[in-house]
Image (cartoon, grey):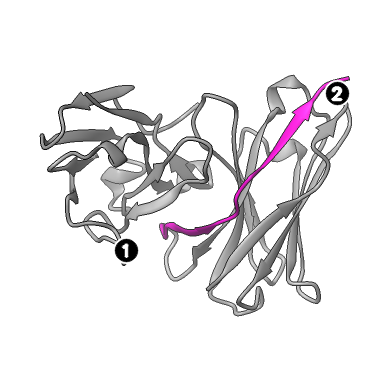
Amino acid sequence: QVQLQESGPGLVKPSQTLSLTCTVSGGSISSGTYYWNWIRQPAGKGLEWIGRIYTSGSTNYNPSLKSRVTVSVDTSKNQFSLKLSSVTAADTAVYYCARTGRITGDRPFDYWGQGTLVTVSS
Amino acid sequence: QSVLTQPPSVSGAPGQRVTISCTGSSSNIGAGYDVHWYQQLPGTAPRLLMYDNTNRPSGVPDRFSGSKFGTSASLAITGLQAEDEADYYCQSYDPSLSGYVFGTGTKVTVL
């Protein structure tokens, strides 16, 4: 059973960089058949896809966040990470990591982390 | 800003049938990309409820069914139960937006 777990600071100051890590257990992140994703959800609002990475390092980002987002992978630790720069209060949200298949572009998010709340405040 | 449009809320009495619509466009659902549905109970992560328009993952009751037609999709819940009270999101893919897109979300209330 694959499990994903987010970790990182719960409080980030405005204009700083938000950094989160997702640790994958129960399966290898290098299996080659999955994308590894970040998704966020502001309180009381809907889901927003942030970006994804393949184990080769290839990435795709939501155009609305692309200028501020970097997703990276560390296969030796079975982890992938998110960095979001120049944060504002609008970036306050629960951040989820999740897995999708890559046979075709439209695979579902089949495994999710439990989510971690990141608050942007001074 | 969500690309797929859902009704904000639907409600029904226990045992009734409710449906949730998900309206997209020619660049996502209408382009032939599959639609998936998620159930999110309060305070928890979304859970995959329906994939590839009409398929239920193991463990999802057959009270849930999905369909897709043109630029839209629909999730139906028959025999509504109190435990179905949750937020529901549709999701697809849109290459013009470089990736995945979600619906606006629908809150299902059991009266």
Q: Residues within 10 Å of mark 1 (few under 14, many from 20)?
A: few
The chain under label 2 reads A
Q: Is residue B73 above or below residue A3?
A: above
Residues tagged by mark 1 and mark 2 found on one chain of the structure: no
Tell me what residue is drawn at x 28 percent, y 52 percent. Answer: B32
The magenta segment: A106-122
The chain under label 1 reads B
Residue B20 rendering spot, x and y as whole percentages = 23, 34
Residue bearing the label numbered 2: A14
Left or right of residue A14: residue B100: left
Residue bearing the label numbered 1: B57
Left or right of residue B93: residue A3: right
Tell me what residue is drawn at x 28 percent, y 58 percent. Answer: B60
Q: Which mark is residue A19?
A: none
Residue B83 placement: quadrant: top left
The answer to whether residue A51 is visible is: yes
